[in-house]
Image: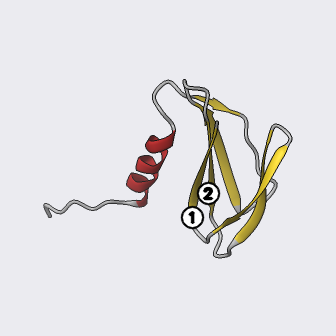
Amino acid sequence: AGKLIYTNAYYYLGHFSKFVRPGAKRIASSSNRDQLSTTAFINTDGKIAVIVLNRSNDQLAYNLAVEGKAVAVTSLPHSISTFVIE
């Protein structure tokens, strides 16, 4: 019909590309919550990008832990959050 329609995938890719830079390597990450999905990358500058997807209808509190240090975080329903660790 000649219309341009932006889907969720378009916005997800845009979000990822802001924090996961060319040459980044995927590193291990995990979640102990069924409603939260996570992935992480180390960029060529050494910064780690951790991306968390909340697939639920609920606001969820959790702890983001990296190398023995943790911070309390709250994820809004159906949101993507990115944390950059230097």
Q: Is residue 79 left or right of residue 56?
A: left
| Residue at left offset 49%, top offset 45% | 16
* Quadrant of the rendering where the N terminus is positioned: bottom left
> Which residue, given by chain and number where applicable, does mark 1 sit on?
79
Which percent across, then down, holds residue 13?
Answer: 43, 47
Q: Nearer the viewer, residue 27 or 7?
A: 27
Circle nearer the N terminus (2, 1): 2
Q: Which mark is drawn over residue 53?
A: 2
Please, what is the three-letter code of the amino acid marked with disc 1? Ser
Which percent across, then down, holds residue 71?
Answer: 77, 54
- Residue that extends furthest to the right in the rendered view of this protein: 68
Count of labels shown? 2
Q: Is residue 26 above or below residue 40?
A: above
Q: Is residue 7 left or right of residue 19?
A: left
| Residue at left offset 40%, top offset 48% | 14
Instruction: State the SS at label 1.
Output: loop
| Residue at left offset 62%, top offset 64% | 55
Q: Which mark is drawn over residue 3?
A: none
Label 2 close to label 1 by CB (< 8 Å): yes
- Quarter of the view holding residue 36: bottom right
